[in-house]
Amino acid sequence: MPLSTLAQAALQAFTNVVQASGDFRDRPGQRLMAEQVARTFSEVTLGKVEEEDAEPVRSIAVIQAGTGVGKSLAYCAPAIALALSRNTRVLISTATVALQEQLVNKDLPLLASQMPQPFRFALAKGRGRYVCKLKLNQLSGSAAQPEDDLFADEEPEPAARFSAHLNTEARLHFYAGMARELASGAWNGDRDTLLAPPEAELWSPVAADARSCTGKHCPVFSECTYYDKRKELVGAQVIVANHDLLLSSLGSRLLPDLDNCLLVLDEGHHLPATALDQFACAMDLSRTGWVDKLATRVVRIGGLVNVSDVTDVPRLAAQLKQTLLDLSRLVMDLYGSELREPKGAWGPARARAPQGLLPVALDEPLRLLSVTAESYLACVSAVGKALRAEIRDKPDEARRLSTLYAQIGMLAPRLEDVFATAQLLLQDAGPPDVPAPQRAAPAAKWFTCEVEGDFIVVKAHASPILPGATLRSHLWSVVRGAVITSATLTSCDKFDFFLKESGLHGDPAAVTLEVSSPFDYATQGRFITSETLADPKDAAGFNAEMAQALVRDLGDVQHGALALFTSREQLRVAVEALPADLREVVLVQTELPRGLLLQRHRERVEAGGVSIIFGMQSFGEGLDLPGQLCESVFIAKLPFAPPDDPVGEARAEWLRAVGRDPFTELVVPATAIRLAQWTGRAIRTETDKAFVYCYDRRLTRTTYGRRLMQGLPPFTVVRHDAQGREVAGVGRG
């Protein structure tokens, strides 16, 4: 199909950039992708549809672009050119901070210098990535204490994991240091720019939060990092966000309207998992001290701003607290045998409700909890509304009133979590007597229990199990034009799995395109499958044998390398197996912050030494170590999902109930994408040469293993026996 005039102009913009810059060069695959982007975005209907009965034209391209294609330029140049000509904006969403920063600090500035029509771009992050100066000043002791101190009645939860630490002099010292760095300009207030970002328990009390923010009425609004960054978004034609922010801001005005902008989803293979995380929820059934604190604040502040609706708050708080404790006891009575098990390798003891069906005994207290939380939230909302009106009408009292607003806003999210979790736990997929294939997919529902200090902490969790259904309902129902791209969108050489996971399977607006990498993998790399005598299902035996083989192969590393493990236990065994000389050159993920570890790795290799990174799943994606920085990748074991993931378990159970095979339909395709990502760390440029080792014999001995191999780049594949000797070439299945 020939390109429209609009699409041709957008593609020409791409061509002009390539020709004008010595930093870019025309690659056939890149041009093919740019053409599809231009075609996709040129044909969509944006904004208000003039004719009442007319359906807007939607167009969605799903593009797998192999490593080295140069996909950032392929989508940026035509998309921006089209946005400028159509008087709209481009919203680029990524999965990682690293890619966000690459786009904003490198790719877009270079592109802006080459395109004839100027454009502005900006980085968008969630509010919680920035510090709230009002909170920081209060917690650091750097602010004069007002009459209504923000934390005057804030006592630590006795069971809080870090309560002892967070409420000592050390905590005050930590926040005071952070406040000094912010005041001096040494730090810009962005959590991601800290050399060692603090744990959530330290960061959360000072993080900006919509529920405790009074915006322009805040006394430190003029110094607010978050709103400074928000101002940059106003005039930007290109906004770089992330998948979490995209999904969490649906229906808000933070990002451009999705029916009136051009959406690019880079690192798109993360989208389904992000959707599940975004719509999952949890509530703490054991630690209830916040309920009374919130009630005290709502009643006191409600009285100050003349809200009569707060008279019922003490009763609602007492009811809520009692119901939470009753539920905690009921859960332990019903699931105690499972929840009293020792903490496992993958997290706290857990009990899942089969088929999403909770015991009848939990039904009434959950309904009472939902009703009570909803009424309580209404009172909190009434006080918040009255406070905002007071702040607007009494600017001279903005500081005091903003502090009061923050007092409520810091605790209100816990109440919202209770309501949301109770609602999802009560959600029923249909009557149990209706056959499973005729019922909707149930939510995953489970409970966890762990000992923190002298206290037992019980939590309730719930999550959707089908990301595709969630994305269809919340995202694709409003998006008009989108390009989804990644190096790993196919699984075992097909797009089917991703299309189902993303909610695009069967969508007539969606088209797929695969653009091969320009790399000569057969010449540049060798994929070595290493046999083991131990069965990979025998964790102890396999880990011991794998560690010995790994140590043997690590001896051949001359510059940089990356070893990837599927569990902390596996990582521990491998570290303990290292002889002294190798231990000196190994950097372990769990021992250093990510940024510092990568810095040391680069320094060692650039100085002519050997450096080997030992990491887990987070190091298997988004890590760009070209040339000598990574000449070998060692994969300890096939990266199947953790065996006790409750959402995965619930989904597998549902698939079996409707007559489908979860291993073939879910496990293998998901593992294929993960393995392709891990393998993709090896060759990053057209001049790289690298080895990839995998110590899992299932890769060559099973039918599904051979399917996994089909989805990998076309390396030269060889086979090693248990002694590390090459025994035969291996076909790709």
Image (cartoon, helix red, strand yellow):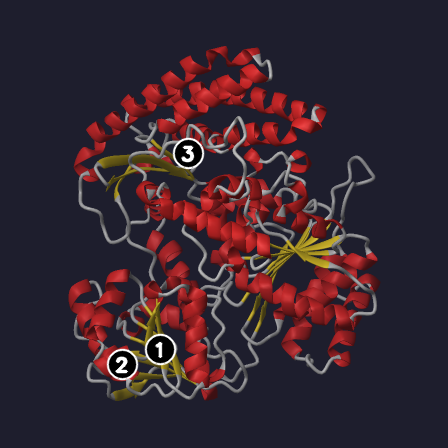
Answer with the quarter of the image where residue 19 lies.
bottom right
> From the viewer's perspective, is residue 693 above or below residue 511?
below
Q: Which of marks 2 and 3 is in front?
A: 2
Q: Quadrant of residue 731?
A: bottom left
Q: Check disc 1: other Cα within 10 Å, few if <14, some if 14-19, many if 20+.
A: many
- Amino acid at circle 2: Leu
- Image coordinates for residue 212, horizontal then vertical, percent: 55, 34
Query: In which quadrant of the rendered image does the N terminus lie?
Result: bottom right
Q: Which mark is residue 582?
A: 2
723 left or right of 473 in image? left
Image disc number at residue 612: 1
Does any portion of residue 161 appear in the rendered image? no
Residue 347 placement (x, y as % from top left): 28, 49
Q: Which residue is more in the foreground, 476 or 432? A: 476
Q: Are marks 2 and 1 in contact (CB under 8 Å)?
A: yes
Question: Which of pointers 2 and 1 lies earlier in the amino acid sequence?
Answer: 2
Q: Is mark 2 on a helix, strand or loop?
A: helix
Residue at 41% over, 76% down: 601
Taking the image as shown, residue 389 lies to the left or right of residue 315, namely right
| Label 3: element kind | loop
Q: Distance between the residues labelled 2 and 1?
A: 9 Å
Instruction: Identify the residue under disc 3.
Output: 439
